[in-house]
């Protein structure tokens, strides 16, 4: 009987030691890894190739129960410790299920401030912080506040390593400007005085005076038609009375002076006139008379073409008294002559 009691006591002691060992193992396992904590990807294991330049980490937290008017400490549940200082909370997402006809609101909270909110998440939780939520800088706590009732299966916390700003450019102190000693003024020897300036057109007038000329004779018939000819007696057989030399045209072009030919034209049954148009302004051309200067040069006089108001016949003249006669009106200036 005594041996049986001792055997039972030994068996109880062995079972107690085994249970104590199992409890210690479970407690040690709980301290090493909390239930529901899983690193899906990221720091410090890998860099996401589709997002070059910084690291991202997504932490999966298994909840698997109804959350009703409760605040979930995501940093503690996901082991987001001081290693993540400087990381930005990019998003808090998850899979959920509605519970009954309750109206539910989900808030992403940091240091008692709301950074995102979602009404009636139903089956998809999606919270994007605004403004930015940086661990250890703008916030110390990261919490999911459920107001109402919601079955939460899984919560994902996506963290992104902050991109370091580029280093400042090297300091280049301002340099003093280079020294430029004063230079003596350039030597300008005295110049001889310029030649005297000739009056405008003086050379042109001298050339024109030396140029050969064609005297143009003027005749007039009883009807009032004026005939201008290079021959003094051309109009006598046709009833024209000779009146003398009216003006002189230049025989050839003078160098560097603009000049143009004058033509004698006729309107059959009406009379004669002079023109610079080789086509005689649509009338018949009888021949070339000579050249006129086409620009006004000091020392030259304009050659006028006048029209008689009563008869319509035309008069070519240098005489200002004829230009101002009340019976005539000026049609054009053909050119300029000595």
Image: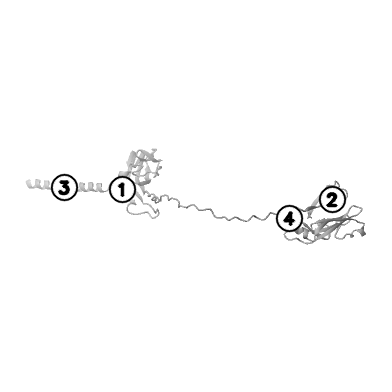
Nearer the observer: mark 3 or 2; the answer is 2
Residue placed under numbered mark 4 in the picture: 202
As helix, strand or loop, the secondary structure at mark 1 comes to: helix
Q: Position of residue 185 (x, y in %)?
A: 53, 53
User: Rounded to the nearest whole Å, what is the CA distance between mark 1 and mark 4?
Assistant: 100 Å
Residue placed under numbered mark 3 in the picture: 17
- In the picture as drawn, the residue positioned furthest to the left comes out as 2
Residue placed under numbered mark 1 in the picture: 83
Question: Does the CB distance between marks 4 and 3 fall below 8 Å?
Answer: no
Q: Position of residue 8 (x, y in %)?
A: 12, 46
Residue lying at 16% horizontally and 47% vertically, measured from the top left: 17
Asked if 13 appears above or below 265 in the picture, the reply is above
User: Rounded to the nearest whole Å, what is the CA distance between mark 4 and mark 3?
Assistant: 138 Å
Nearer the observer: mark 2 or 1; the answer is 2
Mark 1 surroundings within 10 Å by alpha-carbon count, few (fewer than 14), some (14 through 19), many (20 or more): few
Could you tell whether 190 is left or right of 106 in the image?
Answer: right
As helix, strand or loop, the secondary structure at mark 4 comes to: helix
Residue placed under numbered mark 2 in the picture: 307
Closer to the N terminus: mark 1 or mark 4?
1
Could you tell whether 114 is left or right of 330 in the image?
Answer: left
Closer to the N terminus: mark 2 or mark 1?
1
């Amino acid at each position: 009987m005594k041996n049986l009691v001792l055997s039972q006591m030994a068996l109880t002691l062995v079972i107690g030691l085994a249970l104590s060992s199992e409890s210690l193992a479970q407690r040690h396992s709980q301290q090493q890894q909390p239930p529901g904590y899983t690193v899906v990807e990221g720091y410090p294991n890998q860099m996401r190739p589709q997002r070059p330049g910084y690291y991202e980490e997504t932490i999966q937290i298994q909840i698997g129960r109804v959350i009703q008017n409760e605040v979930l400490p995501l940093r503690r549940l996901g082991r987001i410790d001081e290693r993540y200082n400087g990381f930005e909370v990019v998003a808090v997402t998850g899979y959920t299920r509605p519970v009954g006809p309750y109206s539910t609101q989900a808030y992403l909270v940091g240091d008692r401030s709301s950074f995102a909110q979602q009404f009636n998440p139903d089956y998809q939780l999606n919270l994007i912080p605004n403004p930015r939520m940086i661990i250890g800088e703008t916030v110390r706590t990261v919490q999911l506040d459920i107001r109402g009732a919601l079955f939460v299966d899984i919560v994902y916390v996506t963290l992104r390593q902050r991109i370091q700003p580029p280093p400042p450019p090297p300091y280049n102190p301002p340099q003093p400007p280079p020294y430029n000693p004063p230079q003596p003024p350039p030597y300008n020897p005295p110049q001889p005085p310029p030649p005297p300036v000739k009056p405008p057109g003086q050379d042109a007038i001298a050339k024109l005076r030396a140029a050969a000329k064609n005297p143009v004779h003027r005749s007039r018939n009883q009807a009032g038609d004026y005939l201008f000819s290079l021959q003094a007696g051309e109009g006598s057989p046709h009833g024209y009375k000779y009146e003398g030399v009216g003006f002189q045209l230049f025989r050839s072009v003078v160098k560097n002076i603009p000049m143009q030919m004058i033509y004698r034209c006729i309107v059959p049954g009406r009379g004669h006139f002079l023109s610079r148009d080789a086509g005689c302004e649509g009338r018949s051309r009888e021949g070339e008379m000579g050249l006129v200067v086409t620009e006004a040069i000091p020392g030259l006089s304009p050659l006028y073409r006048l029209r008689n108001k009563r008869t319509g016949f035309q008069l070519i003249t240098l005489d200002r008294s004829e230009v101002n006669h009340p019976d005539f009106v000026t049609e054009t200036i053909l050119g300029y002559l000595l």
